Image: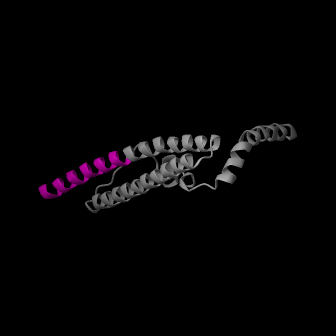
């Protein structure tokens, strides 16, 4: 019994450590994603080879961080499964099962990590303000139709 208690305690400690590492990686990812946005802005303003290299560098770093986030999540899953083998189930009061199953990388979208076709991205950025204004107009028109 004492041996099992020690194993459970070690598993819980490992879970806390991996969870902290995961959360640090998520924070790092969002900081790096800001760098990607700034690099894309620089690239849009000055489409130089240097700015393209910086943009690709930040995208590659984001991809690497995302890979590490997934590895931490896999590690957490394995640790939690090991804990389940001892009959211990973690209950997070802040999240329901539905929230856990429907959440995707805590707001991290994988499409933002892919290398962007700059010509299409640049044209979509130029039209983004127009699209936002048009969408608002459509909503107003829809309201009047009802």
Depth check: give the residue in front, 12 or 18: 18
Q: Position of residue 143 (x, y in %)?
A: 82, 38
Q: Position of residue 107 (x, y in %)?
A: 52, 47
Residue under the image location 81 percent in, 41 percent down: 138
Report whether residue 52 is seen.
yes
Left or right: where does residue 46 sit relative to residue 53?
A: right
* Predominant secondary structure, magenta span: helix
Q: Position of residue 94 (x, y in %)?
A: 43, 42
- The quadrant of the image that shows the C terminus is top right
Left or right: where does residue 37 sit relative to residue 4?
A: right
- The quadrant of the image that shows the N terminus is bottom left
Q: Residue furthest front?
A: 49
Q: Residue furthest bottom?
A: 85
> What residue span does the magenta drawing correspond to?
1-22
Report whether residue 100 is seen.
no
How was this image coloured? one colour
């Amino acid at each position: 019994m004492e041996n099992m208690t020690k194993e459970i305690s070690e598993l819980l400690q490992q879970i806390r450590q991996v969870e902290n590492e995961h959360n640090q990686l998520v924070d790092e990812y969002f900081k790096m994603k800001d760098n990607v946005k700034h690099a894309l802005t620089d690239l849009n303003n000055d489409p130089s080879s240097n700015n393209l290299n910086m943009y690709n560098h930040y995208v590659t770093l984001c991809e690497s961080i995302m890979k590490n986030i997934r590895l931490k999540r896999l590690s957490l899953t394995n640790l939690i499964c090991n804990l389940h083998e001892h009959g211990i189930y973690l209950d997070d009061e802040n999240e329901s099962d539905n929230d856990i199953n429907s959440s995707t990388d805590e707001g991290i979208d994988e499409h933002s990590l892919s290398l962007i076709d700059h010509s299409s991205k640049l044209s979509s950025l130029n039209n983004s303000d127009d699209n936002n204004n048009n969408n608002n107009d459509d909503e107003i028109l829809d309201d009047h139709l009802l």
